[in-house]
């Protein structure tokens, strides 16, 4: 069975400090992994994707994530948070069959 | 690239009305489209998956006669909420995917309010 666990439902950081949003996955196959961001009353925007190429993936808006197979993790990071980063973030795992599993989401709050 | 347009963005209508929501992939061909429902402060709940030219696959508990899905072309899928009632009020989001290992690309969602 496939599952995605976002370890923190809420993360709060100060503007200019690093961001870490944690995601662990469970999959029987080599997964494709994605991070999305959702602003209020909007759809989901793709931040970055891992599809078995480089394990360190760079995305938009300064975000990056590292695929660690030994830890079954795909944590999202950003060196310096901006106020506009405040949003909901979803980690998603695809199997070879194309089934997508969503994490429950992490709400990122950025304090001035 | 990979733009998905969802229309309308906001609908308010009376109970008993049927509402159609469109989802279009503007710059790629989507072999698969997905329809989700999202409740406040929650993750997305998959309602159904549709492949072009075939019947949609509905998730358990989703009424196929209530939520009609049509995926007539590689760039368009529609969701029709038939005889909508206040409990159908929600945020509905579509997504489109080119191939199985590729990411889903999402529309901006439709806020449906049934009075």
Image (cartoon, grey):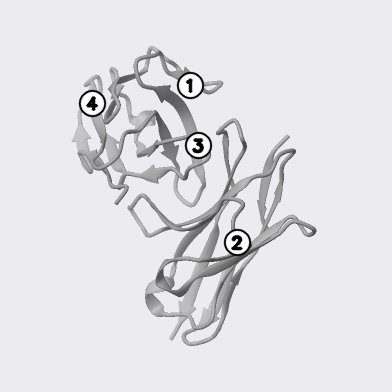
In the rendered structure, the residue with mark 3 lies on which chain? B
* Numbered circle sitting on residue B20: 4
Q: Quadrant of the C terminus of chain B?
A: top left
Q: Which mark is residue B62?
A: 1
Q: What kind of element bears circle 2?
A: loop
Q: Chain of mark 4?
A: B
Label placed on residue A54: 2
Give the image location of residue A38, x and y in percent.
41, 57
Give residue B45's mark.
Answer: 3
Between discs 1 and 3, the one toward the N terminus = 3
Q: Of label 3 and label 4, which has the lower sequence position?
A: 4
Q: Residues within 10 Å of mark 2 (few under 14, many from 20)?
A: few
Q: Chain of mark 1?
A: B
Kindly indicate the quadrant of the structure image that contains residue A85. bottom left
Q: Nearer the viewer, residue B41 or A68?
A: A68
Residues tagged by mark 2 and mark 3 found on one chain of the structure = no
Between marks 3 and 4, how big is the CA–CA gap? 19 Å
Q: Is residue A11 above or below residue A82?
A: above
């Amino acid at each position: 069975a496939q599952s995605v666990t976002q370890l923190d439902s809420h993360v709060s950081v100060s503007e200019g400090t690093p961001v870490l949003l944690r995601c662990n996955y469970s999959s029987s196959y080599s997964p494709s992994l994605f991070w999305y961001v959702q602003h209020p009353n909007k759809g989901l925007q793709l931040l970055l994707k891992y599809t078995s190429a480089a394990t360190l993936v760079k995305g938009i808006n300064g975000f990056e994530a590292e695929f660690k197979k030994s830890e079954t993790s795909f944590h999202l990071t950003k060196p310096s948070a901006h106020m506009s980063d405040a949003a909901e973030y979803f980690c998603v795992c695809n199997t070879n069959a194309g089934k997508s599993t969503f994490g429950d989401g992490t709400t990122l709050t950025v304090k001035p | 690239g990979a733009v998905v347009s969802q229309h309308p963005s906001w609908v308010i209508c009376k109970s008993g009305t049927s509402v159609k929501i469109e989802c279009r992939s503007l710059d790629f061909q989507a072999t698969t489209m997905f329809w989700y429902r999202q409740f406040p402060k929650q993750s997305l709940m998959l309602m159904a998956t549709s492949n072009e030219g075939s019947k949609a696959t509905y998730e358990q508990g989703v009424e196929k006669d209530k939520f009609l899905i049509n995926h007539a072309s590689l760039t368009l899928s529609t969701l029709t909420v038939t005889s909508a009632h206040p409990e159908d009020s929600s945020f509905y989001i579509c997504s489109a995917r080119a191939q199985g290992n590729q990411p889903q690309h999402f529309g901006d969602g439709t806020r449906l309010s049934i009075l």
